[in-house]
Amino acid sequence: MPSMLDAVVVGAGPNGLTAAVELARRGLSVEVFEAKDTIGGGARTEELTLPGFRHDPCSAVHPLGIGSPAFRRMPLDRYGLEWLHPELPMAHPFDDGTAAVLARSVAETAASFGPRDAGTYRRLVAPYVNKWDVLARDFMSLPLSALPRDPIGLARFGIDGLPPYAWTMRRFRDDRARALMAGLVGHVIAPLSGVATSAVGLVFALAAHANGWPLPRGGSQSIADALAAYLRDLGGSVHTGFEVKRLDDLPPARAYVFDTSPTALARIAGLGRAYEGYRYGASVFKIDYALDGPVPWTAAEPRRAGTVQIGPSSREIGAALSQASGGAAPDTPFLITAQPSLVDPSRAPEGKHVFWAYGHVPNGWDGDLTDAIERQIERFAPGFRDRVLARATAGPPQLAAHNANYVGGDIACGAASGLQLLLRPTLSLFPYTTRHPSVFLCSSATPPGPGVHGMSGHNAAKAVWRALRKADRR
């Protein structure tokens, strides 16, 4: 070990590993320290139920991962990362036995909404289709570090995306389109009335049309493993089972980069009340299932989809999101479910399946949502309970214990609502820096926010590199 490292990264989640890789690629000496015995953060894969059933405790489907500007610049396929695409990225069933879909094709998606809204949807996405690479780079990159490649397109996206989705959904005449798009907003656990929630729905839709909503072969752990293997080839190293309680626990370094919650960063780095205004949002109650067969959906489309949203109306979805954010567990939860073994048979024994579902609940909630979740699934897949071999449940306390970044069970590492959706962790043009000149933040508490895409780590690494280069010039 050199006497003085260029950078130490705390936390081996996707953002921490991405930051480490980006710095190592620039020739800097980097070491990563992870409190858990395994790497991955929100991208882990474990046998949670029965032997041979491999589950993702958090993220399973990665619409922003395959299209991430950071990941695309890395040869992660050489290190075992392979994206698998379900026939349909997402399906959204209704009580009448039909379903709308989010397909790779704009036309197929629009047609599933019905004739009254097909044209509206096509017009909504038309300015951005085939422009994902430019839009993603402009939308997800470090503030103030680069001029937009397409300033007109970015401005237009801002006009379409800044209004609350509760306003935007008035464009649609029928609730099929309204409900599916409301469900897309729900992926960041934000009430539909929040600023820029229209952008959230639009980004997820465009991601499907550009690159699909794939799953990594073998589970989300494959993403973290590929990043770590690449880092080691670049000369970096990863230490697991190393809990950091204060900066003095770490080796001397020119920069310390934290893939942690702002709360943990302030405690470890002695920053006092630096992030006292940072808000943590609603949590989820998640169930991982080992199944004796595929989910018996009534509608045909969900049987071919990697992700299935369960919320039969935009009103029900909006109510569930508002209740969870307001401190009440919804009686009729909006569910996001994933079916990894439909496209990856390695995830379960032959003929069996893994399946997960979560509904939104208040931060820190310690109740049990199992019955409410399974009632919702049975509503669209009668006989589902008969196929359950085993289940593993995790509410906010269990999620927080599994990953310290999930404060109160908030899997987004901070409320994705209000101005905090756009400006996090503080109202600053330099979100990755702190008042300590050698300490930086790279978790999903920084822009562009939650998701397994590595862009918060990528952006933070650029901030670190610029700071070190500036110090060298002095």
Image (cartoon, rainbow, N blue to C red):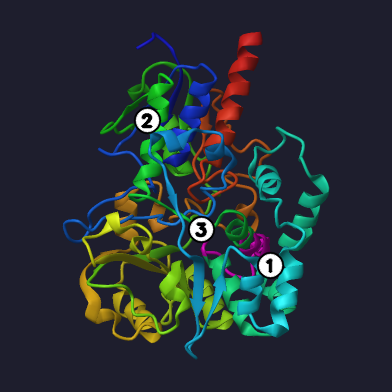
Q: Are marks 2 and 3 in contact (CB under 8 Å)?
A: no
Q: Amino acid at mark 3?
A: Trp
Q: Which residue is mark 1?
A: 164
Label total for image: 3
Q: Is residue 426 left or right of residue 261?
A: right
Residues 387 and 278: in front is 387
| In magenta stretch: residue 193 | yes
| Majority secondary structure in the magenta region | loop
Q: Quadrant of residue 357?
A: bottom left
In primary-sequence order, the first of circles 1 and 3 is 1
The span picked out in magenta is 187-202
Q: Earlier in the sequence, mark 2 or mark 3?
A: 3
Q: Please rate how many residues cluster around mark 2, counting C-alpha atoms within 10 Å: few if below 14, some from 14 to 19, many from 20.
A: some
As drawn, 85 above or below 226: below
Tag 3 secondary structure? loop
- Give the number of the disc on residue 229: 2
Disc 1 marks a residue whose amino acid type is Pro
Task: Estimate how packed mark 3 is, as few (under 14), some (14 to 19) or many (20 or more) residues with alpha carbons within 10 Å.
Answer: many
Quadrant in which residue 416 is drawn = bottom right
Q: Is residue 66 above or below residue 271?
A: below
The quarter of the picture where the N terminus appears is top left
Question: Residue placed at 32% from the left, 66% from the top?
Answer: 355
Mark 2 element type: helix
Left or right side of 433 for 129: right
Q: What's the residue type where badge 2 is placed?
A: Ala
Outermost residue to the right: 152
In the image, residue 31 sits, relative to residue 122, either above or below, namely above
Please say whether residue 208 is one of the residues in the magenta stretch: no
How far apart marks 2 and 3 lie (CA) works out to 24 Å
